[in-house]
Amino acid sequence: MDNIYLYINNEQVGPFAEEKIKRYLKEGRIQPSDLGWVEGATGWKPISEMLGLPIARQVESIPLQSETVSSKINEKIAQVDSKLGRFLGDDQDPAVVDKVVKKAMELLTRGEEIEYVGVQKKPIVTIAPDAVLLTNKRFIVFRPKIMGMTFEDHVWREVANVHMSEQMLSATISCTIVGGKKLEIDSIPKKQARKIYTYAQEVEERMHEERRLRAMEEKRAGSGGVVIQAPMSMPQQSVAPPADDPMATLGKLKQMLEAGFIEASEYEAKKAEVLSKM
């Protein structure tokens, strides 16, 4: 068994080959109760269980009863599951999710919350898979490197034209960043990619509605207004054209149409009514 990851001192390390893990156990550098994980496993397990080693023989020098050891193991597993459980429902790599979530927690702003985490699953593993992390404020891509991890984040108003293309075993998420930059993450399991795409579409619709409302407000503010404040000694009143001046009425209707206060059909109906009285 190769590519074994360890969870020690609340951090994920590795991967290690099985022979190296056994040597570390013999040297006392790790304990049988320490948690391990390999790709494809459903969760973290004690190293002794993964390698088929009896716990009692490996921990004879530890002054703890086997029940106490098992209790501590279960406690560690519960701690991992409680933090990551909500992000592992679609077969994400728990080791990668653990690392990405920890890093993201250092970057979150006030009121920002993690909504979803998607992880690459390539047929050939190189360094480590990339990951997509969505928050209620940002679209973040994490790219592990040999000596660490880099990330690229964009607030949702900068993200546009999110697309998903499905291949035989996985899918690709792509989008355009304000300024024309293209961002693409491939080899995302289809189920995870669909979740990312759906959430991005919901945010994109929300951003579109906010832009539409803002444009309407700006258009109304730029129309010049139709109410003039009267002197303090007199009650406020609207300045309107005389009722018997059809040209002034048509001019006002035209201004209201251009400012977006009335629809074209309403304008044509009112225009016909005024012209009929001339």
Image: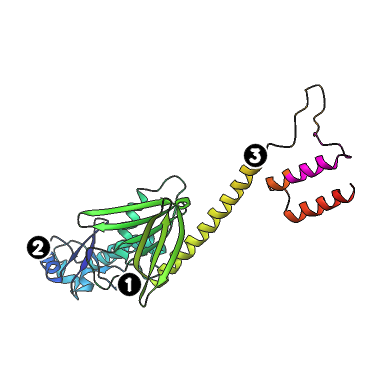
In this orientation, which residue lies closer to the viewer: 223 or 194? 223
The residue lying furthest to the top in this view is: 233
Question: Which type of secondary structure does the marked residue at label 2 adopt?
Answer: helix
Whether residue 220 is situated above or below residue 60 in the rendered picture = above
The amino acid type of the residue labelled 3 equals Ala
Give the magenta-colored segment's residue range: 239-254
Foreground: disc 3 or disc 2: 3
The residues bearing labels 1 and 2 have C-alpha atoms spaced at a distance of: 29 Å
The picture places residue 176, in percent across and down from the top left corner, at 42, 57
In this picture, residue 23 sits left or right of residue 65: left
The amino acid type of the residue labelled 2 equals Glu
The picture places residue 59, in percent across and down from the top left corner, at 16, 66
Q: Earlier along the polypeptide chain: callout 1 or callout 2?
A: 2
Q: Which mark, by number, is residue 221?
A: 3
Q: Residue at (85%, 49%) from the top-left corner?
A: 275
The answer to whether marks 3 and 2 mark residues whose Cβ atoms lie closer than 8 Å is no
In this orientation, which residue lies closer to the viewer: 145 or 51? 145
Q: Which mark, by number, is residue 42?
A: 1
The picture places residue 113, in percent across and down from the top left corner, at 44, 53
The amino acid type of the residue labelled 1 equals Thr
Residue 34 shows in this picture? no
